[in-house]
Image (cartoon, helix red, strand yellow):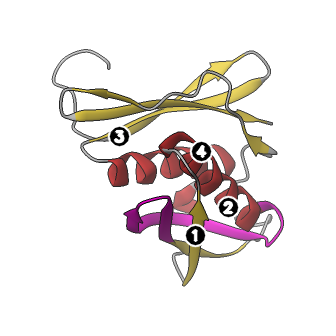
Amino acid sequence: MGGGAQERRGHQPFEHTADVGVRAWGASLGELFEEAARGLISLMVAPETVRPASVRTVSAEGEEPDELLVAWLNEIVFAFDAEHFAPAAVRVVRLEGGTVTGELRGEELDRARHEVRHSVKAVTYHGLAIREAGDIYEVRVIFDV
């Protein structure tokens, strides 16, 4: 998970053929889901160009943690792509059983003001596996662009 003193949570983009991906980690599944979402957001839009003016609730369900993560991230893609909501920040409010609920802070997408980076079509299952290493959860997620 990188060199030197490893932070207990974070995310990092990586390249994968014609797609893009994010490696995310956190001390809990909730932190992992937040970091994966932050990584996704930073691939779609420069968060620093977006004002956290309003809050949008995002929920997803899944049988297994990896299915839940994919559903959660796809809901964020839907908010951005279909509902034209540019997120600047994300927070997991509840993660239990097969349900995750969180909040996106952002505003209506304004392509003149927001730096749009990638058009993410979907979250893939390619190579997706949530791993627990000691007290850190880690995942690599690849996005279809």
Q: Secondary structure at mark 4?
A: helix
Quote the CA–CA distance across marks 1 and 4. 13 Å
Q: Does the CB distance between marks 1 and 2 fall below 8 Å? A: yes
User: In front here: 35 or 5?
Assistant: 35
Quote the CA–CA distance across marks 2 and 4. 12 Å
The residue located at (35%, 55%) in the rendering is 30
If you read the primary sequence from the N terminus, does the residue marked by circle 1 or circle 4 appear first? 1
Q: Does the CB distance between marks 2 and 4 fall below 8 Å? A: no
**Residue 59 — which label?**
1
Q: Can you identify the residue that label 4 sits on?
A: 67
- Give coordinates of residue 126: x percent, y percent: 68, 24
Quote the CA–CA distance across marks 1 and 2. 7 Å
Q: Secondary structure at mark 3?
A: strand
**Residue 10 — which label?**
3
Q: Can you identify the residue that label 2 sits on?
A: 75
Quote the CA–CA distance across marks 3 and 1. 22 Å
Left or right for 126, reference 87: right
In which quadrant of the rendered image does the C terminus lie? top right
Q: Amino acid at mark 3?
A: Gly
Please provide the residue range marked out in magenta. 81-102
If you read the primary sequence from the N terminus, does the residue marked by circle 1 or circle 2 appear first? 1
Q: Amino acid at mark 2?
A: Glu
Does residue 140 appear anywhere in the picture? yes
Is 141 drawn above or below residue 108 in the view shown?
A: above
Q: How many marks?
A: 4
Q: Secondary structure at mark 2?
A: helix
Quadrant in the rendering for residue 66: top right
- Give coordinates of residue 100: x percent, y percent: 48, 64
If you read the primary sequence from the N terminus, does the residue marked by circle 2 or circle 3 appear first? 3
User: In front here: 4 or 110?
Assistant: 4
User: In front here: 67 or 138?
Assistant: 67
Instruction: Answer whether residue 95 is magenta in the image.
Output: yes
